[in-house]
Image: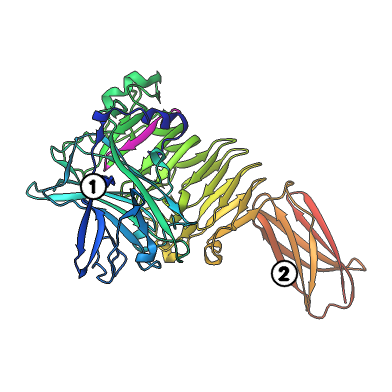
Amino acid sequence: MKLRSASLFLLLPVAASAQLTLPGFLATDTVTRTCPWDTTVNVLTYADWEAYQTLDDTWNGPVDSTTCLELAHVVGQNVEARIDFDDADATRPVFLRLLLDSATAIPLVADDQYAFAVDGFPLSGTILDAGTACTEGLCTGIRVAVRIPDSIGTGSDLRWYQSSYGSSQFGSPFSLCVPTEGFADNALRELVLKFTLASPGPGQQFRLLWPSAEDLLLQGNLDQLVEADLPQFQTGPSSFNLWPMSGSNFLVMYEDTTYPSPAHVSYFDVTPLPNVAQPTAVTLTLEPYTGFNLQPYTQLRGGAVLNNDSIFHTLTVVNNGADVCLAWQIVELFWGDGDRYVHQDGHLGFEGARSCFMFHRGSTLEVAAGATLHYGEGNRGMLALLAGSDVVIGSGGELVMHGMVVLKEGPGVTGREDLHTRLGPGARIRFAPGSKVFNGASHAGDMKWVITMDGGTVDLEGLSEADRQKIILVQLPEEQLTDLTATVLPNAVQFQIASRTEEQGTLRCFDAMGRSLLELQVSLAQGPSAVRVDTPGWRAGTYLAVLDVNGERRIARWVSP
């Protein structure tokens, strides 16, 4: 999880026994290797690391045999660990990999969490691309694979975790929170850094300092959270507050006896104590200076009501200042009917390739009054909003969307159904540069997000022109009906008015002598409406239109040339 301020302080005084030893970049670690594809060239590098490029820009793709990258550079009496992009094709990514295999994979403690980090900094004005619009959805960042037994028990599998450059987890530019699982065999199998230049050019370098992997459980900085622990955090019959206890980080444990997989999800049920027979809203509050993470295929849920395993309580999760780490490669948290995520403070770290919150029908994403939620910083992470879910922004609150909004109808819907959001006074939604809106999985790929502005505002500047078309903005007037205006067109006149609600009305047109020319029933949408009246054969002169809507009357005059 992404720890800052006081949370970061808790990670600094780490005992040596709480740190996993990784091969480093000391002068004593240097070795001279013969370039495998050019035996006439020797490179100075580090014993357990290799820098390389691939032909397809994937970390494990075919190695580009035209480049041999030197990692260790002699500077006076010292040796520096450094990547010189002049030695490579600067227009393509460079990979730095810890050389591990099945025999040298580094054992990790089960049911634990590790803070992997590689310190360093760019030199010579070097700017790295920290975005996601690259091969494998990561331009610059860190990837870690943990080896676990496979589901059959005869082989092994890998759990991949990743984080983009500059996410500042644990204070390092390349850093990542990695939970282990309840298997006897967890091992670090891969650690790969990826470097992509934002503006390729000569003289760009990146200085490497040291790699580290800290065992949060061993250093006393991790609480393994299971359902049986909930009573110690209870603040009311149906409310629980997670404060730092033995450590500042919580890891929600996989408590099911099955093999963790999409078909076998372990639910951490939050249930009133004592339990009750009627569905009740239960609240789990994540307090400041805590980190919050989940083992793979673990979900939060309101528990079952008393004596009925098919009816569940609704769950509200309030983030009051915690850092939530979502670095696993799949969708992380689902929000069901009646569930709410309320953001008052803190941080959501969406780092996995498909990390996201998915809000189903009847669930709500809420930004509290005066709060700001930066969702998917660095264009990472997805926000899945299914039709019938809701986005609520309090007065003075702001949702800043950096990642991708996914719009789709829920299960069983056979036609297009748009998502509707209403913004009250002082509420704001802003799409940051690089954010996206995807509706390709919706019915006919045409679902829209209809945002009704009732005193609130929306900024679409960060979206592409194509993605702006997936957002429909409706501006409500302050009063029930605005003035009626008329615009003269060739052989027609168009009336415009805005209404706070959908309404039915009657439009009548009169000439200068007061003679009735037409009477028309009109339907007004919520927000602006336009009504066109064809006027072929109407003589030049002054005309009057009267619109009656539920006892309210609006009048417009115009002159036809």
In the foreground, 173 or 277: 173
Q: Can you identify the residue that label 1 sits on? A: 29
In the foreground, 238 or 32: 32
Report the span colored magenta. 287-297
Residue in the image at 45% along x and 28% along y: 6
User: Is residue 135 visible to the viewer in this orientation of the structure?
Assistant: yes
Whether tag 2 and tag 1 are in contact, CB under 8 A, the answer is no
Image position, residue 534 (x, y; %): 75, 74
Horizontal relation, residue 235 to residue 230: left or right: right
Q: Quadrant of the N terminus?
A: top left
Q: Can you identify the residue that label 2 sits on? A: 532
Image position, residue 559 (x, y; %): 88, 71
Q: Residue furthest front?
A: 77
In the foreground, 112 or 19: 19
Q: Quadrant of the C terminus?
A: bottom right
In the foreground, 234 or 291: 291
Q: Which mark is residue 307?
A: none
Looking at the image, how many numbered discs can be counted on the residues? 2
**Could you tell me which secondary element the residue under label 2 belongs to?**
strand
- Amino acid beneath label 2: Arg
**Could you tell me which secondary element the residue under label 1 belongs to?**
helix
Residue in the image at 73% along x and 65% along y: 520
- Amino acid beneath label 1: Asp
Residue in the image at 50% along x and 58% along y: 434
Image position, residue 488 (x, y; %): 80, 72
Q: Is residue 440 above or below residue 206?
A: below
User: Does 234 appear in magenta?
Assistant: no
Give the mark toward the camera: 2 or 1: 1
